[in-house]
């Protein structure tokens, strides 16, 4: 049985979400950033920037990513969101890039993609991101996506989704594409920023983006080391890709380059000066 305080937190979250659904019915919950108010289906809005110092790793890294993108994207830029989920980043990115910019949002989970499309519809004044059903990897082909109803942990690795016997997932066939192939086939200019949150597939995604890595694109990448074994990748593979592209890797809330023991968190793959 779950501890009492955990059950209490869960009940509080449920009641808060129900109240928001009544309060924002049909309009979406507001989220203001860079002078723009975006709206999201209750329960799907981004983390607020005020949480950049949160003690919760997930929350802090989400806020740090949003802060970095809000300062680094401007009107006319191109941005890529791999693992867009409900649009928590894709919609703000589209607002930052403006009418003359372009945002491509990859979300292979059909349940999460439906929520993403609902959030896009709530923001008619924001240029719509181009939503792709493809999963990004190191090859073109097909694979199995494991989904638990579109929650934030959908993955091409079952170990990234099923943490206990109760965590049963649905198997969904999805198409694979490499980032280099997609950008080339669609004539898309090198993006200003690429955000990767793919629940363990990040090393394979980077292996399929070697040309892009040699450009000036800024790259944010969430690391999920616990799932790498199922993907057949390792930290050594990641370090090889990063070094071979003339980049360095550090966690968003650290100055020094990443050490020899990776842990969950978001890194920035910076060009070496």
Image (spheres, rainbow, N blue to C red):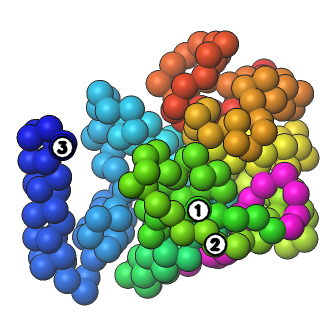
Q: Which residue is mark 3?
A: 1
Left or right? Give the position of 112 relative to 190.
left
The image position of residue 126, as x and y in percent, is 48, 76
Residue drawn 76% across and 64% down?
Answer: 143
Q: State the SS at label 1.
A: strand
Q: State the SS at label 2.
A: strand
Q: Which residue is mark 1?
A: 146
Q: Which residues are magenta?
A: 126-141
Sequence order check, earlier mark of 2 and 1 = 1
Q: State the SS at label 3.
A: loop
Left or right? Give the position of 43 relative to 254.
left
When the figure is inspected, residue 255 is found, relative to residue 176, above or below; the finding is: above
For mark 2, does the 10 Å Cα neighbourhood hold few (<14), some (14 to 19), or many (20 or more) residues? some
Q: Nearer the viewer, residue 6 or 37?
A: 6
Residue drawn 62% across and 16% down?
Answer: 261
The image position of residue 63, as x and y in percent, is 39, 42
Q: Which residue is mark 2?
A: 172
């Amino acid at each position: 049985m779950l501890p009492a305080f955990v059950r209490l937190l869960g009940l509080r979250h449920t009641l808060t979400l129900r109240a928001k659904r009544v309060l924002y019915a049909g309009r979406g919950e507001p989220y203001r950033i860079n002078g723009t108010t975006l709206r999201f289906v209750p329960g799907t809005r981004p983390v607020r920037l005020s949480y950049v110092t949160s003690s919760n790793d997930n929350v802090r890294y989400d806020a740090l990513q949003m802060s970095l993108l809000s300062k680094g994207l401007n009107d006319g830029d191109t941005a890529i969101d791999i693992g867009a989920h409900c649009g928590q980043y894709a919609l703000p990115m589209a607002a930052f890039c403006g009418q003359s910019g372009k945002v491509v949002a990859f979300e292979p989970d059909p349940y999460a993609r439906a929520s993403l499309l609902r959030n896009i519809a709530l923001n008619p004044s924001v240029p719509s991101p181009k939503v792709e059903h493809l999963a990004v990897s190191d090859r073109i082909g097909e694979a199995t996506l494991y989904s638990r109803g579109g929650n934030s942990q959908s993955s091409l690795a079952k170990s990234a989704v099923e943490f206990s016997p109760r965590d049963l997932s649905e198997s969904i066939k999805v198409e694979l594409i490499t980032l280099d192939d997609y950008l080339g086939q669609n004539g898309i200019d090198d993006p200003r920023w690429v955000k990767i949150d793919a629940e363990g597939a990040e090393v394979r995604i980077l292996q399929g983006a070697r040309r892009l890595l040699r450009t000036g694109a800024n790259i944010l990448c969430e690391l999920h080391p616990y799932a790498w074994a199922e993907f057949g990748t390792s930290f050594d593979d990641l370090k090889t890709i990063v070094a071979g592209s003339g980049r360095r890797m550090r966690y968003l809330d650290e100055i020094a380059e990443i050490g020899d023991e990776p842990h969950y968190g978001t890194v920035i793959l910076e060009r070496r000066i």
